[in-house]
Image (cartoon, rainbow, N blue to C red):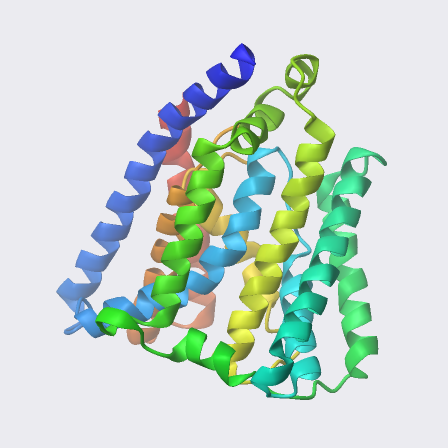
Amino acid sequence: MNLVNRVMEWSQRGSNREVSIAYVAAAVLFLAGSAFIRGFFGWGHVLAIVSTAGFVGIVGIGQTFTLITGGIDLSVAYMLNFGALLVTGISLGSSHHLAPALMVVAVVAAVAGLVNGVGITILKIPPLIMTLSMNSILEGVALLYSNGTPTGAAPPLLTALATGTGPLSLPWMVWFWAVVSAFVLILFRKTVFGRWTYASGSAPRASWLSGVPVERVVILVYIISALAAALAGLLLAGYSGQAYFGMGDTYQLESVAVAVIGGTSILGGRGSYLGTVAGALILTTLTSLLQVLNVGASMESMLYGVVIIVMMMLNRERQA
């Protein structure tokens, strides 16, 4: 266990520096927007950005976990989409049917994550191939389930959570993301599972020899990723009022991007969800800024790539 503790200490020291860079970058982006666009830094607009960032931030929970273990989850797009389809199709817009709908979504997500984890750890299928294949399977199952035509509507409780306003005039989405983020940070930093996650990504063989159940950790990480993606799907269904095909497509690479921008290493062993939160704020602020400036979609995609490369270079220098 001394090895595990040393890995955790090393990872957190590096992550703190990289997280600081991410938050400085987010602040600079906000200030740049307010310098060019009147009202960009207004309280209402800031709350809107934070609320919107919460969706990709929640998907980024699982991506942060999987990247730290040295993997990746490319099945989040249709896990998110299928979760939204299930909750709207089962509840049919009624809060009375929300509980069974949530149970079905949770079971489906857990099974999908379990299959991903088993495929990667037991069958030794590369994470990229395994999760991309699972994404295709979920897409096919979603088409069979809905017969190509999504039905139903989001229950009022989900709509209120995604779009309503709570205490202190803050959106419920901001409160919800804050609570979820606090839970994830505690899970990473204060639990044995968090230490095992870092160790499994930093030195899997040495960690296994030290008594860390690496395979079980990786399987559980992919279950968490699937549950996080499904949760984001429920919230997006509440935000839009319904489910539709393709609603999770943009989140597949964005969820990787926010984790990487926040300092999580694609090689495993380093990262922090606090950095992923900053990455979500950066990506969402950049999107908002480009939309206000009426920049075309092609330029928007190129700028995304530039931002990701620049942040990775800064983090690489810090890691070196």
Residue 283, visible in the rendered structure: no
Vertical side of 116 occupied by 238: above or below: below
User: In screen coordinates, is 143 left or right of 284?
Assistant: right
Nearer to the camera, 165 or 41: 165
Q: In the image, what residue occupies the spot 49% across and 50% down?
A: 257
Which image quarter is the C terminus in?
A: top left
User: Residue 298 at what x, y percent from top left?
Assistant: 47, 67
Nearer to the camera, 241 or 247: 241
Nearer to the camera, 196 or 268: 196
User: In screen coordinates, is 232 left or right of 185?
Assistant: right
Which image quarter is the N terminus in?
A: top right
The quarter of the displayed image where residue 205 is located? top right
Vertical side of 276 occupied by 37: above or below: below
User: Residue 239 at what x, y percent from top left?
Assistant: 48, 78
The quarter of the displayed image where residue 109 is located? bottom right
User: In screen coordinates, is 210 left or right of 144?
Assistant: left
- Tally of numbered discs: 0
Nearer to the camera, 290 or 219: 219
Vertical side of 213 occupied by 74: above or below: below
Residue 210, visible in the rendered structure: yes
User: Residue 123 at what x, y percent from top left?
Assistant: 85, 36
Q: In the image, what residue occupies the spot 52% across and 27% down?
A: 195
User: Residue 152 at what x, y percent from top left?
Assistant: 66, 88
